[in-house]
Amino acid sequence: MVAAGLLLCCVGGSAKAQGSTLYGGGIKVPLNDDGSKYIRFITWHQVWARYNENNSGSIRNNEQQDNTLDFGLRRSRVLLYAQISPRFLIVSHFGINNQNAVSGGLAATDGKKPQLFLHDAYTEYKVFGNALSVGAGLHYWNGISRMTNTSTLNFMAIDAPIFNWPTIDATDQFARMIGVYAKGKLGKLDYRVAVNDAFSTTLGRTITSASNYNPENNKKVYQGYFNYQFLEQESNLLPYMVGTYLGTKKVFNIGAGFMHHGDGAWHAEQRGLTQDTVKTNIDLFGVDAFLDLPLNQESGTALTAYTVYYNYDFGRDYVRSIGIMNPATGGGALRGNAYPTVGTGNILYTQVGYLLPKDLLGEKARLQPYGAFSYNNFEGLRDNSGDKVPAKVLDIGANVYLEGHHAKFTLNYRNRPDYTNINNLKYRPEITLQAMIYL
């Protein structure tokens, strides 16, 4: 599944943010003599080779498979943006995601000819310096957390945990909605707020005792994220927040955010002989902290750490299982590599990485080992005794940077739960090698 997708901070200082001295300004076409009017182009591919021990009963091409070795395009994108003056900005972003040999294609039965679609398409006007800009369109100015606004070009771990985009492809379009937003900086406080239309969804068409999305709802979605930047300030020209600066920036932020969708969920309530439909709000909250700290100027070592706590309320016992670029096509909601990812309850996620000294791998390559852990404690995950069964996922890996984030390899080991039998939980390994280049 999913993604998000997303860039990084790709403005004038982007070469520094990427950890690359050779990249420069990228593909940037000036439209006047002083370069104040320009168009910038960015394109990237993230290619995965993966070994996956499948969940019990997983089926691929009508054959049960206990494990799978597969290849896929996690993301393939093109982004361009332009300023015809310092006050006006236009952003267009399109591409594909999650294509492998059996899924992600135009037809639901295979992976061929995936649909090229818009990720972002919005315009923006600067009202008052850095304090206030307003925009409208299909956009990624999200609430809830830093990671809900994250860039996919400079992750530290191999990918996002996905619950950072809690309505992914349900009431949003790959973590985007159509609406209006405002963003800016007030001193060291960086803010973004938005009012959007929710996309229609079929996920809740069959109403059950467990809550799901309400398909009969036309209320607006309100969201916002606020973070206080104690040390160096981060750019907010584009919405995509950096995952790791590779020791080129000293950042410490604390943030909090929300999303509210009135009557966004519904469930069936049995009252005597009658069944009533009960509508509830979707209320999602997050608090987080981000640290990116150079440790030794001479050796280039650096520490990156991020922690976020989510409190999600989608209504009674809501749980959604997701498998990224799932290698299996059959076997139910928990096939392949899927596990309970989003739900009503609490989520704690943390990641830590250490950029090793410059000369460890030679003149240009850099090595950054990392670890990430998530703990999903949902109301709707209970065993036969009625006890909650939390979903715990461990990722351990390393990035090899050949040209900062512009050319890198990532090797990741994941230990994830198989909920095929919630009363006898098993953990399955997943090993992924990613090759990524962006220009």
Image (cartoon, rainbow, N blue to C red):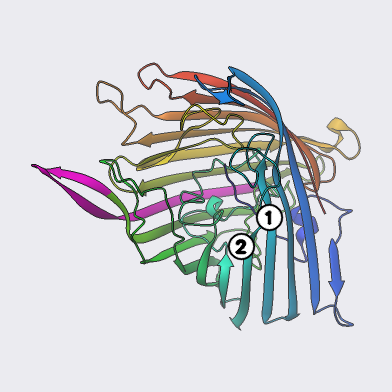
Packing grade of label 1 (10 A; few <14, some 14-19, many >=20) is few
Q: Nearer the viewer, residue 54 or 251?
A: 54
In the picture, the disc for residue 116 is 1
Q: Quadrant of residue 136?
A: bottom right
Residue highlighted by disc 2: 239
Residue 284 lies within the magenta run: yes
Q: Is residue 268 above or below residue 434?
A: below
- Residue 84 on image: x %, y %: 75, 81
Judge whether residue 129 is colored magenta.
Answer: no
- Predominant SS of the magenta segment: strand
Identify the secondary structure beneath mark 1: loop
Element under disc 2: loop
Q: Quadrant of the C terminus?
A: bottom right
Q: Amino acid at mark 2?
A: Pro
Q: Position of residue 391 (x, y in %)?
A: 43, 30
For the magenta stretch, what is the residue range? 267-292
**Distance CA(mark 2)–CA(mark 1):** 22 Å
Q: Nearer the viewer, residue 361 or 101?
A: 101
Residue positioned 46% across, 67% down in the render: 196
Residue at 55%, 64% in the rendered image: 141
**Coordinates of residue 208 in the picture (x, y in percent):** 28, 42
Residue drawn at (63%, 68%) of the image: 121
Picture disc at residue 83: none
Quadrant including the N terminus: top right
Occupied quadrant, residue 132: bottom right
